[in-house]
Image: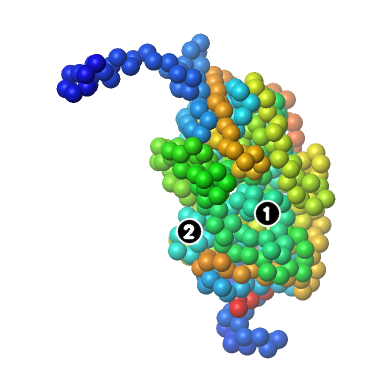
Amino acid sequence: MTAPKPQQRDVERNSEGVDVMSDVVVPARAPWSAVIAAGRSLTITDLGGNQAVDFLVYDAHDTAVRYSAPDTIQAQGNIYLSTESVLMSNEHTRLMTVTADTCGRHDTLGGACSKESNTLRYGHHTWSQHACVDNFLAEGAKHGLGKRDLVSNVNWFMNVPVEADGTLGIVDGRSAPGLSVTLRAETDVLVLVSNCPQINNPCNGFDPTPVRMTVR
Amino acid sequence: MTTATTHGARDHARAQDGTEVEAMPRIPAPDGAVWAETVAGGNYTHKVLARGTEVRFTDLEGDACAHVLLYVADRPFERLNVADTVKVLWNAYPGAGHLLLSDQGRVLASVLAADVPVETVCGTSTLARNTARYGDGSPHGASPAGRELLKLAAAKNGLAPRDLPPSISFFKGVRVDPDDGRLTFENSSRPGASITLRAEMPLIVLVANTAHPVDPRPDYACTPLDVLARPGTPTRPDDPLWNSTPEARRAFLNTADHLTARGIA
């Protein structure tokens, strides 16, 4: 079976009459990447509802400087991302800022699913299933990134509560069709996305769906 | 003693033999240990350890904070994955009986004993943040950043900054508010508090001893860390830890599968 390819719509004006740089629907289970210039914005729209979007961001000119979940959490004193959250790099510099968020809360702790971690969480019967790390590796390779360049990522639209005793887990989502998050690039960045293919937990409502990426 | 001549300089250097200070490696490690070292506050160390080694970290004076990264010794692209560790274990505050997992679904180390939880949320400090908070974050300064120290430890194992993923730390704690996700810092340690890991694969261990990144005290504080490692036996299937959870059992099985195929189980 041929993997679905992202449907690129290079349009100057989208269906809402807004001038855009690019407007892409990323199919369910697929990766996506883009270089976004400082000052431009990326809007990620959850088209089908409760679709986790695994997300990494790098300094486009020095990919050793990349998103750091711990630095982001340190900077805002909170594990959840929403409007005004700044995605910080491992050198504690600003990569992107959340400028709008109609979902309300996004995950920084859960990381990406992988074939390997799926064997631990669900069993070895999941081994042939697709996973976000494979999306990151395949898409990252287009930009010269490899396994060493993968770190804990953002999970947009994914709901990961932490209980008082530290119990943490991926639970039913808080997102819905049409909810979105918008990020402004604070420097030239490379964004790497996996539209999560996970079917063993509720992060995608057990039904991975397409998401829309709009760069303005 | 003159150091104006080569012979004088040599005598001067050699006269330092046997000097003892608090923060230094003890070589050879005494009493059958394989690693015995006191790490100064604001300093770092690193070691390659055999599978089965038990390594104990002790907060000697109450203000140590060990920032730790683990790599498989001969394939360091397999390394500690903090996200998988907390997600697979279903716990953000791992303690005794928990496992530190690699990105390949295997056990790098098990936590044999711990007086304090492993801190998994906040990573380590950076040059930029320590400079903003304390006026300096350089390795040679008075308030070194954990990431700067780990870069040095990594370099001495052939690793580059891109090989440094989010790290864990021992002794200082951070709690997450269950309602709104806000962090609370806990000065959870005390003199003599310790945590003991067992290497379940051959490991490169990088350690930076420096203040926790969200320690709210305005002045940098970090005191010596003691490290003591002894040879030991990796977790076997008859160990209660092996079957402690379904996830642990599969992680140990994956580890054994990998090492058996390589002939080094």
Q: Position of residue B162 (x, y in %)?
A: 48, 50
Q: Nearer the viewer, residue B6 or A212?
A: B6
Q: Position of residue A133 (x, y in %)?
A: 59, 55
Q: Is residue A213 above or below residue B32?
A: below
Q: Chain of mark 2?
A: A
Residue for point 64% across, 68% down: A183
In the rendered view of the protein, which quadrant contains the N terminus of chain A? Answer: bottom right
Three-letter amino acid code at disc 2?
Thr
Q: Which residue is mark 1?
A: A76
User: Same chain, marks 2 and 1?
Assistant: yes
Residue for point 58% across, 34% down: B221
In the picture provided, is A73 more to the left or to the right than B50? right
Residue for point 53% across, 71% down: A38
Q: Which residue is mark 2?
A: A63
Q: Position of residue A207 (x, y in %)?
A: 76, 64
Mark 1 lies on a secondary structure that is helix
